[in-house]
Image: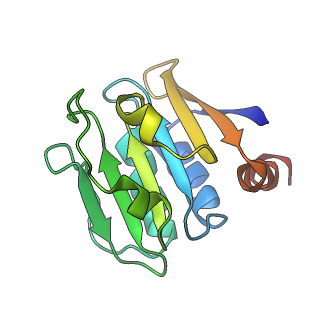
Amino acid sequence: MNQEWTFTSHSPDDTANLAERLGRLVKRGNVITLAGDLGAGKTTFTKALAKSVGVTRNVNSPTFTIMKEYEGFLPFYHMDAYRIEDEMEDLGLEEYFEGSGVTVVEWPAMILDQLPKDRLDITIQYTGEEERVFLFHAYGDHYLSLCKELFEA
């Protein structure tokens, strides 16, 4: 079962506030995917989410390294799947998805068959110069509860 929620951000600060609220609700082993065009706000969202789980280092896109790991009060794994080749080699992704931290995956369409069934998918759409619409798709009971707490509390 999945359900969808929509949030309109009117500025980068709105985006950061949304991510920080989500960060207060995530737990070990959570997987969050971020889809959207280049410049849509995926990294802005990720930076704020990382900060909310205690990451103090600068978070930037792992475009050429595929994965960056950060320490906070929860381990934070930031993955950019954009450059992963069609013939998927064994990258050990399940170790992150089933691990002790929070994993954020940018460009999830590149590894769709590798992603866990239960996860939170977020799509970011441009709707104005600074305005974005965030579409949250929750898969699994945990993520349904998480989104209900985030949006309906």
Quick one: 82 or 136, which is closer to the camera? 82
Quick one: 40 or 67, which is closer to the camera? 67
Which residue is at the far top? 127
Where is residue 105 shown, x and y percent of the image?
41, 45
Where is residue 36 shown, x and y percent of the image?
43, 27
Residue found at x 62% / y 64%: 26
Which residue is at the far right? 153
Residue found at x 13% / y 45%: 64
Determine whether 50 is above or below 44 in the image: below
From the viewer's perspective, is 43 left or right of 3? left
Quick one: 142 or 93, which is closer to the camera? 93
| Res 10 quadrant in image | top right
Where is residue 121 shown, x and y percent of the image?
57, 38
Where is residue 91 shown, x and y percent of the image?
26, 52
Determine whether 100 is above or below 114 in the image: below
Instruction: Specify whether residue 108 is in view.
Output: no
Determine whether 65 is above or below 138 in the image: below
Residue found at x 23% / y 30%: 87
| Res 54 quadrant in image | bottom left
From the viewer's perspective, is 68 left or right of 131? left
Q: Quadrant of the N terminus?
A: top right
Residue found at x 26% / y 36%: 88
From the viewer's perspective, is 26 left or right of 47? right
Determine whether 109 is above or below 52 in the image: above
Q: Quadrant of the C terminus?
A: bottom right
